Image (spheres, rainbow, N blue to C red):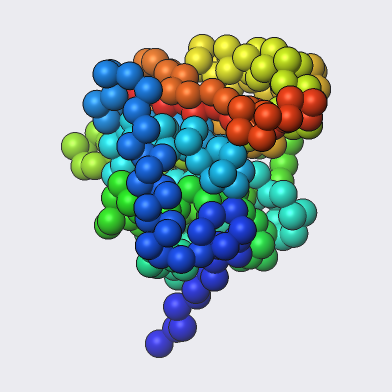
Amino acid sequence: MATTILRHAAVAGRFYPGDREELQAEALGYLSQTTGANQVPIPALGCIAPHAGYMYSGHVAGAVFARVEVPEVCIVMCPNHTGMGQPLAIMSEGAWQTPLGEVAIDAELAEALKARFPALQEDSAAHRAEHAAEVELPFLLLRQPKLRFVPIALGTRQFEVLEHLGKALAETIAPSHQNGKERVLIVASSDMNHYESDAVTRAKDHRAIERILSLDPRGLYDVVTQQNISMCGFGPSVAMLTAVRQLGAKSAELVKYATSGDISGDRRAVVGYAGIVIS
């Protein structure tokens, strides 16, 4: 019998509390911070959530995951910050450890994705020290205790590859949507512009956000690459937008926007955070 692969939490105790009770209390606090009366969870197709330390971006991520009905199966795509492993890295077996418990990988969905898009490579190295998918899991797990997921780390900037991945995601999960099964939520893990002034970051970010709210993956790609917007997860976001458009997405909502300067008070060099839900 094969040994189950367990991916250990890489940034517990750094990006978020490593203690179960402390993490649960902090994440639930962020999930309960509603920004208005219109906060009934919706059956979303996709979302963008930030992945910085919870101190800085947890309130934005919490607003996203409070806004969506989290199904039992999610695809979590993130950028590859470490440079390790393959540029299109998937894990299709085992589980990820979190302080709140283990989250199993949905092997059936992962294998179906690899079959439809063979450029996806089985590769745990790209995920081992990468924080950007890991930090989303406590929020998802608190909203859906039966959570299973498929992690994908992207180290490519090629539009055609990201577009093909998005189409493959849509084609793979469309049957479950059409057959009345519970939908699959596609999570794109991304921060926005990095390490410029608060004013510059907000201006750049809102140009990118405008393309996301227009459900325009090519427009997002072009504005990020041509206007030097250092949005680390634009690749996952382009793939997610491509997929949800093919799945029939009609609208996108900016749930919350902030910069690290809102927390630190230092507005000279900030990181932007956008929480967006697409349905």
**Quadrant in the rendering for residue 197:** top right
Above or below, 276 against 172 in this view is: above
Left or right, 152 with reference to 203: left
Above or below, 97 against 60 in this view is: below
Instruction: Residue 259 in the image: state x and y as whole percent.
Output: 63, 27
Q: Residue at x 37, y 52 (%)?
A: 25
Instruction: Residue 153 in the image: state x and y as whole percent.
Output: 61, 50
Q: Indicate the quadrant containing the C terminus: top left, top right, bottom left or bottom right.
A: top left
Instruction: Residue 51 in the image: state x and y as whole percent.
Output: 58, 43
Q: Is residue 223 visible?
A: no
Q: Nearer the viewer, residue 185 or 258?
A: 258
Q: Nearer the viewer, residue 116 or 186?
A: 186
Left or right, 14 with reference to 135: right
Q: Residue at x 29, y 50 (%)?
A: 144
Instruction: Residue 8 in the image: state x and y as whole percent.
Output: 54, 70
Q: Is residue 16 visible?
A: yes
Q: Nearer the viewer, residue 129 or 223?
A: 129
**Quadrant in the rendering for residue 108:** bottom left
**Quadrant in the rendering for residue 258:** top right
Q: Indicate the quadrant containing the N terminus: top left, top right, bottom left or bottom right.
A: bottom left
Q: How many marks?
A: 0
Q: Residue at x 58, y 22 (%)?
A: 217
Q: Residue furthest left?
A: 180
Q: Nearer the viewer, residue 44 or 239?
A: 44
Left or right, 179 with reference to 26: left
Above or below, 158 against 128 in this view is: above
